[in-house]
Image (tube, rainbow, N blue to C red):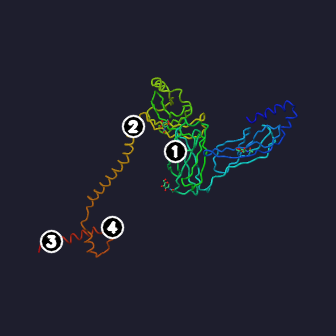
Amino acid sequence: MEGLPGLRLLWALAALGNAASEIAAETYPPPVTNFSISVKNLCTISWHWSPPEVVNTTCTLWYDSYLGENQEISSNNYRVEEVALNERICLQVRSLCSVASTNPSDAVEMCTLPPEGDPESAVTRLQCIWYNLSQMNCTWLPGKKTPPKANYTLYYWYHSLEKSLRCTNYYMEDQLTGCSFDLHKVNVSSSDKIQIMVTDTTGTIRPSYNVILLNSVKPDPPIITVLSLQNDSLYVEWESSENFESSCLVYQVQVTDSKPKTYRVEEAKSKCYISQASQELSGNSREKNCLVIELTDRDTQYTVRVRAKTSKYCFEDVDLWSAWSPEKIIGQKPDLTFYTITLLSIPIAISISTLLLLLYLKRLKIIIFPPIPDPGKIFKEMFGDQNDDTLHWKKYDIYEKQIKEETDSVVLVENLKKTSQ
Ligand SMILES: *[C@@H]1O[C@H](CO)[C@@H](O)[C@H](O)[C@H]1NC(C)=O
Ligand SMILES: *[C@@H]1O[C@H](CO)[C@@H](O)[C@H](O)[C@H]1NC(C)=O
Ligand SMILES: *[C@@H]1O[C@H](CO)[C@@H](O)[C@H](O)[C@H]1NC(C)=O
C-alpha cells in the first residue's frame, strides 16, 4: 500500500517527460531508519525498518535485503525468515529509488545475538525423520562438553501451533538421543518447516536449533497381500501405508531363489488384476500395487519382500527406504532335507566306520598280543631297575617278553619243586 502514492507521483512525473524519470532513477536514497529485530516461536526472525527520513520526491522506495547470499527485493519494510539461530544471523538492507535501480543507499545491518553458553556444550547433528507422515523422530549427539547425564528437552513448532510444544517421549538409540512426537500430515503442508530446539532442563547446555524441511520422509514398510504362481510367472501384490498416495511412493521388490534379484517398481498399479476384482467387490478405494515376474525355474522356492520410499514427484529425493516388508514364501522347495541328510550322513558314516575299524583293530591286537599280566614287578625284580619311565618301558618291550618266558619257566620249576616236597 505504501508504494501507491509513490507510483502516482511517478505517473505524474512520467507525464512531464522522460528526462525527469531518468534523474529519479539516478538518485541515491538515504539509508533506512529505525531498524529492529524480533524472534518469535523458536526460529522465526522478523526484521522491521522505517523508510529513510528525507526522500527525493521522485523516489519510489524499494528495499534490497541480503541474508547471507539470499537476496530479496521488495517494497515491504520488513522481512521474515525461519533460520536456525545457532550463530549470529545478520540482515543487510539498502533502500532503492526504483525496483531496478543500480544506485542503492548505504547498507544498514541488524543481527541476532548468538545463543548464550559454551558452543561446545550444545548438542550436535540435530536431525529429524518423518515416519509414515504421522510421527517425527528427532535425534542428536552430545557435544564435546555436554554433561553426560544432561536432562534434554526438545521444543518444536510448526505453523498450525500457537506456541512451541515440549516433546515428552525421549529415547536412546546407540550413541544417539532422540525424542519423538506426533505430527500428522493433516496438520502441516509440505512447504512448511518445523522449528526444533534442544537444550536441557537446567539450562546448562547451549540451545541447539534446526529448521527442518518436511522431506525426510520414511514410509512404513509395505505389506504383501497376494503372492501367487501363475503359469510361468510370479504375481506379487502389496499395500502401503494409507497415508501415502500411491504415486508418491516407489518400491523395490526383492525375489530370492538361490540369489536375490531386485526389481524397481515406479508405476505399479496398471496390472493388478486380482485387486481390481476385489476392489470392485469391497468398494475399497485404496490403490494396490503389484508386479508380475517371469520365472525361469518353477521348481524352486521363492522368498519375496518389498520396501518403499518416497518418490521425487511428491518429496525431495532423500533416499530413505522403509524397512522391508515381512517376507512371504511360495513354491516347492527341492527336497532340501533329503540332500542335507545325504550330504551330512556321508562324513558321519565315514567317521563312525573309521571309529569301528579302530576299535576292531584294537580288539584284534588284544587277541593277537594278549596283555602281559603285571610284567613290571618281575622285570624290576630281575634287573633291579627303578626307572619307571614308560618310554623306557616301551623300548624294552620285546626284550621283556623273552625274559618273561624265562621267568615263567623258573617259577614253574620252583612250583614243581614245592609240590614235590
Ligand atoms: C520506529 O519503530 C517503532 C515501532 O516499530 C515506531 O513506533 C516508531 O514510530 C518508529 N520511528 C520512526 C522514526 O519511524
Ligand atoms: C501409519 O499411519 C497410519 C495412518 O495414520 C496408521 O494407521 C498406522 O498405524 C501408522 N503406522 C505406524 C507404524 O505407526
Ligand atoms: C533429570 O530429571 C530427573 C527428573 O526430572 C531428576 O530426577 C534428575 O536428577 C535430573 N538429572 C540431572 C542430571 O539434572
Q: Name the residue under label 3.
A: 416
Q: In this view, does 4 lie to the left or right of 258?
A: right
Residue 229, by quadrant, is: top left
Res. 255 visible in picture: no
Q: Do callouts 2 and 3 mark residues in contact (Cβ within 8 Å)?
A: no
Q: How dense is the environment of label 2, judged by Cα within 10 Å: few (below 14), some, or many (20 and up)? A: few
| Residue plotted at (76% across, 35% down) | 3
Image position, residue 63 (x, y; %): 75, 41
Position of the C terminus by quadrant: bottom left
Please name which of the two marks, 1 or 4, marks the residue nearer to the observer. 1
Q: What element carries label 4?
A: helix
Please name which of the two marks, 2 or 3, marks the residue nearer to the observer. 2
Q: Name the residue under label 2.
A: 335
Pick whichever of labels 2 and 3 is earlier in the sequence.
Answer: 2
Q: Is mark 3 on a helix, strand or loop?
A: helix
Pick whichever of labels 4 and 3 is earlier in the sequence.
Answer: 4
| Residue plotted at (45% across, 25% down) | 282
Which residue occupies the foreground of this view, 84 or 378?
84
Residue 385, by quadrant, is: bottom left
Q: Mark 4 points at which residue?
A: 394
Please name which of the two marks, 2 or 1, marks the residue nearer to the observer. 1
Q: How dense is the environment of label 3, judged by Cα within 10 Å: few (below 14), some, or many (20 and up)? A: few
Q: Label 2, label 3: how many angstroms apart (C-alpha)?
A: 76 Å
Please name which of the two marks, 3 or 1, marks the residue nearer to the observer. 1
